[in-house]
Image (cartoon, rainbow, N blue to C red):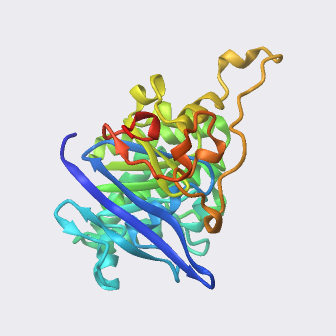
């Protein structure tokens, strides 16, 4: 797992507006190793989905990448024209969205959609594409007899499994899963995540798993990146980070996650004070300092750098 499939360097995304620019992603860098599952976690508005959109080239206008580089192995992909970008999407990088109905055409059978995806991206015959489509359904535990069924004839969990089959059908190197289980029942969430994890291991695909759930991070990922206000707060091995979180924001996220220790109803669940700042009202210095119980004087004026390749916090910087 040492080879980097994806390398993101100093990525900054901006959205012009009448009073200047909004910056949902501000100077973040990370690698995704071959075969690993890396989680992106943080509150709503932290920049998780925007990072995924930037990687796959789906930032809504007028937003654009102002600086930074995105490399897929040895090819830079952040400056591709539309035709070249379309050859990357679906073939080398696939996306699994939160709502499977946004990915599936309600007027076409799932079999047709799988076959079309395979024919678009792989040099195979129509017969071979159909065989691969049926095999893909079997991999996600869907009866091949449902090949000619329509999306509305499936439950939410089954639709999400179809989307996973679609994402894997062209044998991509990287899958970006954007909160793929949020709309599902808890028991079905576990099944879908375990299936995604198993199949990506078998296919050798790397995964960026975007979520707000630390429990999902703990059960599914190899490494985790914590985002706050479009900035990378902390990154590291999942189990190490969960056992020994460094950034106060990471500590707060973990402490606010329910666990069996909260079986006593008299125990209050921890809550991070305040809320994520608006993009047009980001504070100077460390974006988290207005909510941080360990803030130092210079946290309000100086932005911390990533220290020890893991945490961006003045508590671990020499000032």
Q: Is residue 317 above or below residue 206?
A: above
Q: Is residue 212 visible?
A: yes
Q: Is residue 171 visible?
A: no
Q: Residue at x 36, y 52 (%)?
A: 135
Residue 38 shown left or right of residue 214 in the figure: left
Q: Residue at x 37, y 42 (%)?
A: 37
Please identify the quadrant where the N terminus is shown.
top left
Q: Quadrant of residue 118?
A: bottom left
Q: Quadrant of residue 267?
A: top right
Q: Residue at x 67, y 15 (%)?
A: 261
The percent coordinates of residue 234 (x first, y second) are 43, 41
Residue 77 shown left or right of residue 283 in the figure: left
The percent coordinates of residue 293 (x first, y second) are 63, 34
Q: Nearer the viewer, residue 61 or 103?
A: 61
Q: Residue at x 31, y 37 (%)?
A: 308
Q: Is residue 297 above or below residue 14?
A: above
């Amino acid at each position: 797992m040492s080879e980097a499939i994806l390398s993101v360097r100093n990525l900054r995304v901006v959205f012009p507006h009448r009073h200047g620019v909004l910056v949902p992603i501000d100077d973040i860098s990370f690698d995704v190793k071959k075969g690993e599952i890396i989680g992106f976690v943080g509150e709503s508005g932290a920049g998780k989905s925007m990072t995924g959109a930037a990687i796959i080239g789906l930032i809504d206008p007028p937003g654009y990448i102002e600086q930074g580089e995105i490399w897929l192995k040895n090819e830079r992909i952040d400056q591709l024209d539309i035709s070249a970008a379309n050859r990357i999407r679906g073939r080398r990088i696939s996306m699994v969205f939160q709502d499977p109905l946004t990915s599936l055409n309600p007027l076409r059978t799932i079999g047709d959609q799988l076959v079309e995806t395979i024919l678009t991206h792989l040099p195979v015959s129509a017969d071979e594409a159909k065989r691969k489509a049926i095999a893909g359904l079997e991999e996600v535990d869907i009866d091949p007899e449902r090949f000619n069924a329509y999306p509305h004839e499936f439950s939410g969990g089954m639709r999400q499994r179809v989307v996973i089959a679609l994402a894997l059908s062209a044998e991509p190197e990287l899958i970006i899963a954007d909160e793929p289980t949020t709309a599902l029942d808890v028991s079905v969430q576990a099944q879908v995540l375990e299936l995604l994890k198993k199949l990506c291991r078998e296919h050798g695909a790397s995964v960026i798993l975007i979520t707000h759930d630390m429990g999902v991070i703990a059960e599914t990922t190899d490494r985790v990146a914590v985002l706050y206000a479009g900035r990378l707060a902390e990154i590291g091995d999942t189990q190490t980070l969960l056992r020994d979180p460094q950034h106060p924001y990471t500590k707060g996220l973990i402490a606010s996650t329910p666990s069996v220790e909260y079986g006593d109803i008299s125990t209050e669940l921890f809550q991070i004070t305040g809320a994520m700042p608006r993009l047009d009202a980001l504070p100077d210095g460390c974006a988290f300092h207005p909510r941080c119980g360990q803030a130092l004087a210079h946290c309000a004026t100086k932005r911390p750098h990533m220290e020890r390749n893991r945490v961006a916090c003045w508590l671990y910087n020499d000032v």
